[in-house]
Image (cartoon, rainbow, N blue to C red):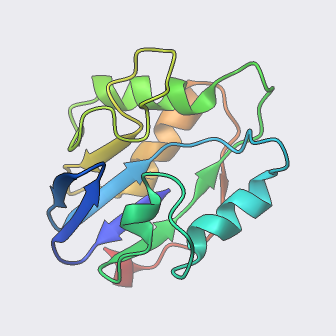
Amino acid sequence: MIIKVNDMIRFTIRNKEFTLESGIYCYNGSALGKSTNIENRINWHLKKEKKVHWHIDRVTVNQQSEIIQIVFSESKREIQGESLVSQEMAKNPKFTVPIPKFGASDCKNNCPAHFFKFNSKVNPIYEVLTIYTSLNFSPLLKFQYTQTHA
């Protein structure tokens, strides 16, 4: 997910407070739950009103955040795409980790996080698509990006 944070967000996880500055963020997740498919997971993340289940829900329920694009790809269950994408983002100077291990607390691939801040003036969707194609994924987009989200 590519998320625009319009103004500072503060939230608490396990009695620890976190702050996100305004900007563009990318969250890499999977839809590998027992009864989940990609459409159900996308629809979950798009809801503002929901019971907070995952760490990223603390961001997406906030009124200062808006999901501006969802990039996804079908892959085999044994391929942990969210980790591969996260590892590429971690190597790319256009992305930084705002909160260590955020979204990756149970990751077995030693990812620094599955949540990144995008620090560039170029289109974030282009950068994410470039990472997907470099990994030989066939990316699909959920929304049509408009300049109002820039």
Tell me if residue 134 comes above or below residue 13 in the rendering: above
Residue placed at 56% from the left, 35% from the top?
A: 132
Tell me if residue 22 comes above or below residue 74 in the rendering: below
On screen, residue 52 versus residue 13, left or right, reads right
Tell me if residue 84 comes above or below residue 117 in the rendering: above
In the rendering, at what x and y percent does residue 120 appear?
20, 51
In the rendering, at what x and y percent does residue 2 appear?
44, 59
| Residue at the right extreme, as displayed | 35
In the rendering, at what x and y percent does residue 137 appear?
67, 32
| Residue at the front extreme, as displayed | 15
Residue placed at 59% from the left, 53% from the top?
A: 71
Tally the marks.
Answer: 0
Location of residue 102 (image quadrant): top left
Residue placed at 55% from the left, 70% from the top?
A: 51
Location of residue 11 (image quadrant): bottom left
Residue placed at 45% from the left, 79% from the top?
A: 146
- Pick whichever, 51 or 119, lies toward us: 51
Quadrant housing the C terminus: bottom left
In the rendering, at what x and y percent does residue 130 appear?
48, 38
- Pick whichever, 50 or 40, lies toward us: 50
- Pick whichever, 1 or 131, lies toward us: 1
Tell me if residue 9 comes above or below residue 116 in the rendering: below
